[in-house]
Image (cartoon, rainbow, N blue to C red):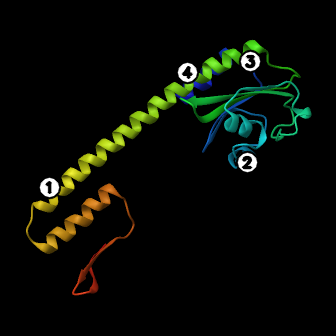
Amino acid sequence: VLAGARDGLPLVVPFGAAAVAFVVQVWFFRSTAPATLLRNLVIPPGQGLSGMVVAGGKPWRVPDVSREPAYIGVSPKTRSELIVPLKAGERVIGVIDVESELLSGFSERDEQLLVTFAGQLATALEKVRLLQAERQQRELAEALSEAGAALSASLEFEVVLDRLLEQIQRVVPYDAANLVLVREGRIHVARLR
């Protein structure tokens, strides 16, 4: 989906640099800023232009970033910017941020086109997220069902404990685990792994 967005975005709005920023991660398509800066860039909602769009949920066309106190200067060549929210319903999941080396580099029409593009991208990303969540839930349900079957397949206590740890590993991957049982008011480690 992001590769399609990267390829389609230049057809929607001409820009010098662009990024799709999610609330947890940023994907830069093209930028003049140093790569080391971009890898570590974290902008909280409500801070900077992109963070303010995340917090407010409305597009923002900035004709001159040097006159905007909220601007965080990532690229010295940027003169104007257009930031549009990516929304899943009413929830902002990120932004598309395009930059220009020209003052007033983006028009109202560019904003309208980018809003439309952002809506389509957000819909595609939400579908992918929902499909992944559904697949994870299905895998979890299968693992729990198999765990129940594996546990009830044996009447030997030691075998059941071993199988229990195996099935827990499938549901909640771990580096180490133990089963602790209470017998006669005292705690006993029944199994370690």
Q: Are marks 2 and 3 in contact (CB under 8 Å)?
A: no
Whole-angstrom CA distance, mark 4 to mark 2, is 30 Å
Mark 4 residue type: Gln
Q: Residue at x 40, y 40 (%)?
A: 133
* In the rendered image, the vertical position of residue 22 relative to residue 62, given as above or below: below
| Disc on the earlier residue, 4 or 3 | 3
**Label number found at residue 92:** none
**Label number found at residue 149:** 1
Query: Extreme right residue here?
Result: 67
Whole-angstrom CA distance, mark 2 to mark 1, is 51 Å
Q: Residues within 10 Å of mark 2 (few under 14, many from 20)?
A: few
Using the image as rendered, state which of residue 43 and residue 28 is in the foreground.
Answer: 43
**Label number found at residue 120:** 4
Whole-angstrom CA distance, mark 2 to mark 3, is 25 Å
Which quadrant would the C terminus be assigned to in this image? bottom left
Q: Where is residue 95 drawn, in percent x and y? A: 65, 32
Whole-angstrom CA distance, mark 4 to mark 3, is 18 Å
